[in-house]
Image (cartoon, rainbow, N blue to C red):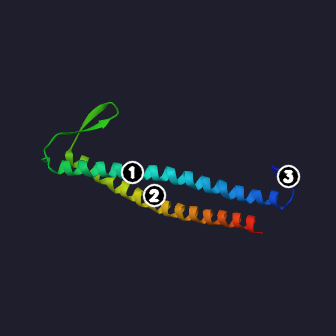
């Protein structure tokens, strides 16, 4: 039944190792995607923090505009500040969740790697 054509012990042991390897690759892809997403969120957070810091120097009667599609909409500076703070809080919450998921995936990857190592050791040792 195996790809090698044999039905002995080595043919049956290939499937669990391949399945473990596939799981390891899938977790690796998830980690890569998650790290990219995390970097993007951290970059957005830093950019928003800089914008908030620059807006603190602006007077309260300063005219501000917010983009809506292809146009600019006059918006009170207080609303712009509040919107940026809400975005910052939401982004910080998402970053916390992503870091938690990253820790979980890293533990899962280590577990799968150990499982693969053990399966290979059993294959060669016995």
Identity of the residue drawn at 27% across and 52% down: 49
Identify which residue, 121 or 83, lies in the foreground.
Answer: 121
User: Residue tagged by mark 3?
Assistant: 1
* Tag 3 and tag 1, C-beta contact below 8 Å: no
* Tag 1 and tag 2, C-beta contact below 8 Å: yes
Identity of the residue drawn at 75% across and 64% down: 123
In this rendering, position of residue 25 left or right of residue 5:
left
Quadrant for residue 115, please give it. Answer: bottom right
Identify which residue, 79 or 4, lies in the foreground.
Answer: 4
Identity of the residue drawn at 40% across and 48% down: 40
In this rendering, position of residue 109 left or right of residue 68:
right
Return the disc, 3 or 1, that comes first in the chain's sequence.
Answer: 3
User: Residue tagged by mark 1?
Assistant: 41
**Mark 3, secondary structure of its residue:** loop
Q: Is residue 83 visible?
A: no
Disc 3/disc 1 C-alpha distance (Å): 48 Å
**Mark 2, secondary structure of its residue:** helix
- Quadrant of the drawing holding the C terminus: bottom right
Q: Choose mark 3 or mark 2, whichever is in front.
A: 3
**Mark 1, secondary structure of its residue:** helix
**Residue 99 placement (x, y as % from top left):** 44, 60
Q: Which mark is residue 13?
A: none
Disc 3/disc 2 C-alpha distance (Å): 42 Å
In this rendering, position of residue 61 left or right of residue 19:
left
Q: Choose mark 3 or mark 1, whichever is in front.
A: 3
Crowding around mark 1 (Cα neighbors within 10 Å: few <14, some 14 to 19, many 20+) is some
Seen in the picture, residue 10 relative to 125 is either above or below; the reply is above
Q: Is residue 37 visible?
A: yes
Return the disc, 1 or 2, that comes first in the chain's sequence.
Answer: 1
User: Residue tagged by mark 2?
Assistant: 98
**Residue 78 placement (x, y as % from top left):** 21, 49
């Amino acid at each position: 039944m195996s790809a090698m054509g044999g039905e002995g012990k080595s043919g049956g042991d290939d499937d669990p190792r391949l399945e473990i390897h596939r799981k390891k690759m899938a977790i690796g892809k998830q980690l890569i995607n998650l790290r990219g997403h995390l970097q993007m969120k951290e970059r957005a957070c830093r950019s928003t923090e800089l914008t908030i810091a620059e807006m603190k120097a602006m007077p309260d009667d300063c005219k501000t505009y917010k983009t809506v599609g292809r146009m600019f909409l006059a918006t009170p500076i207080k609303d712009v500040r509040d919107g940026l703070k809400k975005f910052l809080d939401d982004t910080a919450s998402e970053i916390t969740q992503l870091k938690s998921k990253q820790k979980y995936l890293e533990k899962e990857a280590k577990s799968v790697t150990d499982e693969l190592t053990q399966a290979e050791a059993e294959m060669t040792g016995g």
